[in-house]
Image (cartoon, grey):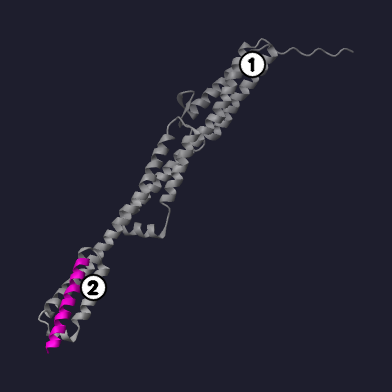
Amino acid sequence: LDARLKDADEYSSKAGSFLDDAERALGQLEPKQAEEALAEAKKVLAEPEMHLSPEREMHAGRHAELLARLPAVKEARRQRDIEEAVRSERAEIGPSLQAMKDAAEAVAGPKVDEKSIDTALAAVAALEKAVGASDDRRVLANQDPSFGGYLKRAKAETDKARAEVTLAQKKLKFLAGPVALKDKANEELARSKKEKDPEKKRALLASAAAGYGQCQSAGLELTKGGAASEKVQVAGAATTFEAFLATCKSAQQSTEQALAKLPKPKAAPAPKK
């Protein structure tokens, strides 16, 4: 009997130790470790000698109490894991999102340049990569609706930034096309005013008038899709696509009028017979 009582004391000590481990694990939101410790405690409590221990009922009651806490701890751990995953995702996405917003803002005004556009395009691509769809991210978005909303807003910001970049590219084409054509026509018009030779003057005016017409044709293509009222910086001043093209039209009309006022070119003399 003494040997069995000694075994009972040892089993009681083991059961208490396993229950201590389980309680500690529950407090640290480690349900898996708690579950393992409770399973070990249950085995010890099932030993025949434990019936001789005066602490058996106390251990059994404690085991039942800790086991009842396990579902709530599992849920708390699940929520903590979700929150940590969301923080990690936001930490990864946040810098790319802000960099893209800054880059898109830099190309949103009337003044644009190729370097800023390239920077914005790279920023959009970086964010698209950061928020790229994955099974884990989809699961996380379903588990945390606020994170799902965050991803939707990031996607909306990406679409907005891409639209800004597309418009900025159109502005750059406007500068390289219609604006450059008008500049060339203006130079020819200025040269015509100084030209003394009537035929050379006529040729310069005709070329300038054609250039103003080309300015309008090229510009009309770029104003499609609602860009007519967009602002663009030309020669240091902000104007709209539409307003600039109107100056090309006016310049063409006045140039054609000047061309019409020139004396008619002399007819070539008839060949001698």
Mark 2 sits on what residue?
A: 37
- Front one among 23 and 52: 52
Q: Earlier in the sequence, mark 1 or mark 2?
A: 2
Label 1: element kind: helix
Going by the numbered disc 1, the residue's amino acid type is: Leu
Residue 65 quadrant = bottom left
Which segment is the magenta one? 1-25
User: Which label number is shown at residue 259?
Assistant: 1
Is residue 114 in sight in this rendering? Answer: yes
User: Can residue 75 be found in the magenta stretch?
Assistant: no
Within 10 Å of disc 1 (Cα), the crowding (few <14, some 14-19, many 20+) is some
Assign the N terminus to one quadrant of the image: bottom left
At x 18% / y 86%, what residue is drawn? 48
Assign the C terminus to one quadrant of the image: top right
In percent of width and height, residue 59 lies at: 14, 76
3D distance between C-alphas at marks 1 and 2: 100 Å
Observer-side mark, 1 or 2, equals: 2
Going by the numbered disc 2, the residue's amino acid type is: Ala
Within 10 Å of disc 2 (Cα), the crowding (few <14, some 14-19, many 20+) is many
In percent of width and height, residue 144 lies at: 31, 57
Left or right? Give the position of 21 relative to 207.
left
Q: Residue furthest top?
A: 196
In percent of width and height, residue 228 lies at: 48, 32
- Front one among 19 and 192: 19
Does 171 appear above or below 264?
A: below
Left or right? Give the position of 76 relative to 115.
left
Left or right? Give the position of 74 relative to 255.
left
User: Which label number is shown at residue 29?
Assistant: none
Label 2: element kind: helix
